[in-house]
Image (cartoon, coloured by chain):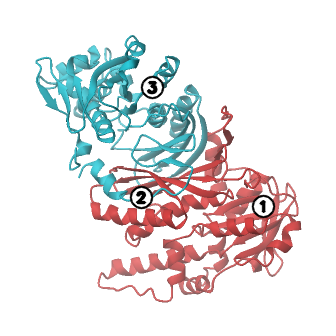
Chain colours: A red, B cyan
Amino acid sequence: MGKVALIERLTADLVLRNPSTVAGIGDDCAVVGNTVVNTQTLVEGVDFDMMYTPLKHLGYKAVAVALSNVAAMNATPRQALVSVAVSNRYSVEALDELYAGLRLCCERYGVDLVGGETGTSRAGMVLTVTALGEVDPARITYRHGAQLHDLLCVSGDLGSAYAGLLVLEREKVTYQADPNFQPDLAGYDYVLERFLKPEPRLDIVKTLREHDVVPTAMIDVSKGLADAVLHICRASRCGCEVYEEHLPIDYQTSRVCSEMSKNMLPVSCALNGGEDYELLFSINQKDYDKVKDLAEVHIIGHITEEGMPAVMVTPQNTTITLRAQAFQGADE
Amino acid sequence: MGKVALIERLTADLVLRNPSTVAGIGDDCAVVGNTVVNTQTLVEGVDFDMMYTPLKHLGYKAVAVALSNVAAMNATPRQALVSVAVSNRYSVEALDELYAGLRLCCERYGVDLVGGETGTSRAGMVLTVTALGEVDPARITYRHGAQLHDLLCVSGDLGSAYAGLLVLEREKVTYQADPNFQPDLAGYDYVLERFLKPEPRLDIVKTLREHDVVPTAMIDVSKGLADAVLHICRASRCGCEVYEEHLPIDYQTSRVCSEMSKNMLPVSCALNGGEDYELLFSINQKDYDKVKDLAEVHIIGHITEEGMPAVMVTPQNTTITLRAQAFQGADE
């Protein structure tokens, strides 16, 4: 069962009783009064591999991931709480490094670290970050607001974090075969940084505010573009067309793909790669002029009517229906 | 290094920048505006043993533990977010059970479940619950407000959750030696329920409000009375005297101890057992008349001046200095 169907099963018929609860499960954050809040857990061996993840980067990334969800609500992050469970193979000095990263990301984005628990795990590390943000109710963005003919936009570029992961996995395999092997990561700096130390796109939230644009719907791209698009379409009860030639893909991403295999297409990394932490959002066409020249914002498609699928249109003008693992078994 | 010294090292020199941040690390919850928030993680094999933990109880307990921290701030819980990481040996039906427990505890305490992530773990289950509560700023209680001569009170009884754990561990060992063994848990119902399905003492928060009492300091007793007392004394810069004969201990707790070993004293379970989730609080002496006849509230001692240790006075009038694992290496 895919994640979407599972969560819907587990949380079916939930009733929200408190007046302060504005929005519950089903978006990047819950909304409580003017506060948005989300919790993200990273598990060693699943979400990160200690073999190539410096602890300081890991701490930074754990906070960044939670702040990215705050950004996706068009909100400003203010506080973070951290809960770390570690096995006894981690030294105090290792925790110092981890916290240095957690604190650096908080500091960079003006976030107060207000909770910090450490506990014991049986094996490996489990990191949970809860982030709180402040939002103007008039500017809050959910996944469910996209309207017919809205333009679909994405920030930054797509697939580069996954390209970084591919490089790290390749070096790991080589190293395991020959421990004297010295990894040469020169020329991959951009994709590696994208994977190891992502930045929440709070700059985009700020730019949109400065240009007086409120997206009609928004989500962060954490599990590939296809997953993000499908979430918006499902929540907004609409279809969409995305144009392959408009997908922003960095040249390093393309280079890594061509090195890996003939069959590894950069567009596949963009659609299914994950961990980019860019923002996908829809805007009303009246805002086109305000958005078209914004740095780091790309218009990649538009919303179609309810009942239509979410598709990608290739340069050859064929359409490919978008699919994502999370939606397996869900009524797309 | 003990937990207190470790957290203080990791979070040294943290600066709080946002006006909405009222209180950061160092209490049962952080305080953001009129909202209190805390995150609690339970790890399989460390915080719970699947061999004797029904999943529905586990879900209930995970929420109860987070709500207990909200109660300790004298606040009313309103929202909870859950993050579950499970290995693939858990079926969808197992998650149904877990969520049934999570939802039951939320419902019982009028809490809206507003976040529910499921992810993958490499081994076992990791459960994180974030709870948010609402508090009247005039009634908020921290660990740091206890004053000289204040009376120290505790709710319910102490050591019974640990007694329940001892019974479960004993049955587990017997079962492992002989899988045909049928555990007989009759007569242990109270201590087992205390361990498997604790209740946050929100009834005490309500009672105190109805009787117009605001504790000067409060904490929940999650790692034994000694740990809780030391936290209040450290935060409030004071000492205290606790009277052994006033510690509330259930007869089932005493019975379990006598069954286990001649050297297992009920008072040790109360001081160091943990998982009781009762409330420890200090009140001004002027509130004595309001508190003395409250059901489930026991006056167990009083606050002494700064520089004095936290001690327990025995019926033989000897004093024992209180110690707790978390404070190892910290300047008590």
Question: Is residue A2 at least partly visible in the picture?
Answer: no
At 69% across and 50% down in the image, what residue appears?
Answer: A330
* A310 is higher (above) or lower (below) than B294: below
Image depth: mark 2 or mark 1 in front: 2
Which residue carries the number 1 mark? A214
For label 1, the crowd category at 10 Å Cα-Cα, with few meaning under 14, some 14 to 19 and many 20 or more, is many
Residue A141 or residue A245, whichever sits in front: A141
At 60% across and 85% down in the image, what residue appears?
Answer: A262
* Same subunit, tags 3 and 1: no
Q: CA distance from mark 2 to mark 3?
A: 32 Å
Q: Name the residue type under label 3.
A: Arg
N-terminal-most mark, 2 or 3: 2
Which residue carries the number 3 mark? B201
Q: Name the residue type under label 2.
A: Leu
Element on which disc 1 rests? loop
User: Where the C terminus of chain A falls, by quadrant?
Assistant: bottom right
In which chain is the residue bearing label 2? B
* A98 is higher (above) or lower (below) than A36: below
* A307 is higher (above) or lower (below) than B308: below
Element on which disc 2 rests? loop
* Same subunit, tags 2 and 3: yes
In which chain is the residue bearing label 1? A
Which residue carries the number 2 mark? B14
For label 3, the crowd category at 10 Å Cα-Cα, with few meaning under 14, some 14 to 19 and many 20 or more, is many
Do callouts 2 and 1 mark residues in contact (Cβ within 8 Å)? no
Question: Is residue B221 at least partly visible in the picture?
Answer: yes
Position in image of residue A139 (x %, y %): 75, 56
In which chain is the residue bearing label 3? B
